[in-house]
Image (spheres, rainbow, N blue to C red):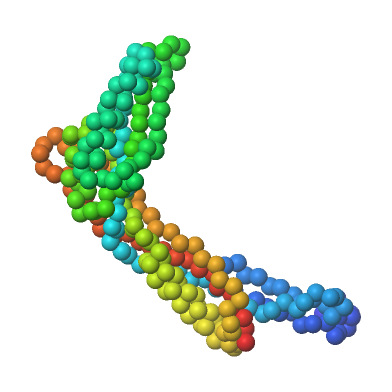
Amino acid sequence: MRRLFAPLGIVLIGSVAAAAIVAASTRPSIIVTSPSATTSSPPIEQAILTSGDATISKKPDLAIVGAGIDSQASTASAAQSDLNSKASKLIGRIKALGVADSDLNTTGYWIGPVYAPGGDSITSFRATEQLQLKWHNVDSVGKALDAIVQEGGATNIYVSFTLNDPKPAQAEARSLAIADAKAKASAMASAAGVKVGQVLQISDVSSNTRVPYPYAARADSAPTQVPVGQIDVSVSVEVDFAIS
């Protein structure tokens, strides 16, 4: 191998040395070679590429409730008429709970045939409507669900929790994630014998999720219990630091 590369070493005398990019373990390692002195491309800046993560927990202050109704009849118009009657009852009960018009909307409306086994003939028609409402008092959402089902006639129910304004929590988590990225960059720079310079680039992805809570109508008079718990707000960032 020495015999093979010795002539090449002589030819490449005077070229710019290769610049190594120090990469975080969560991002793919990249090795970039500086362009030859004979080219006009700008030199590639040495950098430390790293990532940071942070998660904070907050109690949700908003419940998203889905309430569905359906109807089935021999004709499409009869199914629709019956559905409209049920929807009027459900919407009236929801508004009686204090839900504002701006917090109530329709997320789905469907009318279609119901086929016999084998799919060769239509036996009836089915109509469904799905409503969604915002419930701002998360601690009383169980009582609201009971009222919507037992008095409003809803048959398909789900509830999920979120933050009415997630931006403050995201900003807090983002600051922690950037601090995490900087700590990783400092550790890598120290190990490599270099120093961390200014930030070259930052990108971030924020998310906060909670699985919808299934609601089962109760036969007894005991109120439905819906534990609220806390919601996780997670932020991941990728930060490129210059090597000073």
Q: Residue at (20%, 43%) from the top-left corner? A: 97
Q: Residue at (46%, 77%) from the top-left corner? A: 179
The residue nearer to you, when weighing 190 against 140, is: 140
Q: Residue at (58%, 82%) from the top-left corner? A: 198
Q: Position of residue 96 (x, y in %)?
A: 20, 40
The residue nearer to you, when weighing 231 against 90, is: 90
Against 211, residue 1 (above or below) is below
Q: Residue at (23%, 53%) from the top-left corner? A: 137
- Asked whether residue 159 appears in the rendered view, the answer is no
Image quadrant holding the N terminus, namely bottom right
Residue positioned most to the front: 101
- Asked whether residue 51 appears in the rendered view, the answer is yes
Against 209, residue 202 (above or below) is below
On the rendered structure, is 206 left or right of 196?
left
On the rendered structure, is 187 left or right of 63?
right
Residue positioned most to the left: 221
Q: Where is residue 21 in the image (x, y as percent from the top left)?
A: 65, 76
Quadrant of residue 62 within the rendered picture: bottom left
Quadrant of residue 202 within the rendered picture: bottom right
Quadrant of residue 58 within the rendered picture: bottom left
Image quadrant holding the C terminus, namely bottom right
Against 156, residue 179 (above or below) is below
Number of numbered tags placed on the structure image = 0
The residue nearer to you, when weighing 107 against 33, is: 107
Residue positioned most to the top: 121
Q: Where is residue 66 in the image (x, y as percent from the top left)?
A: 32, 41
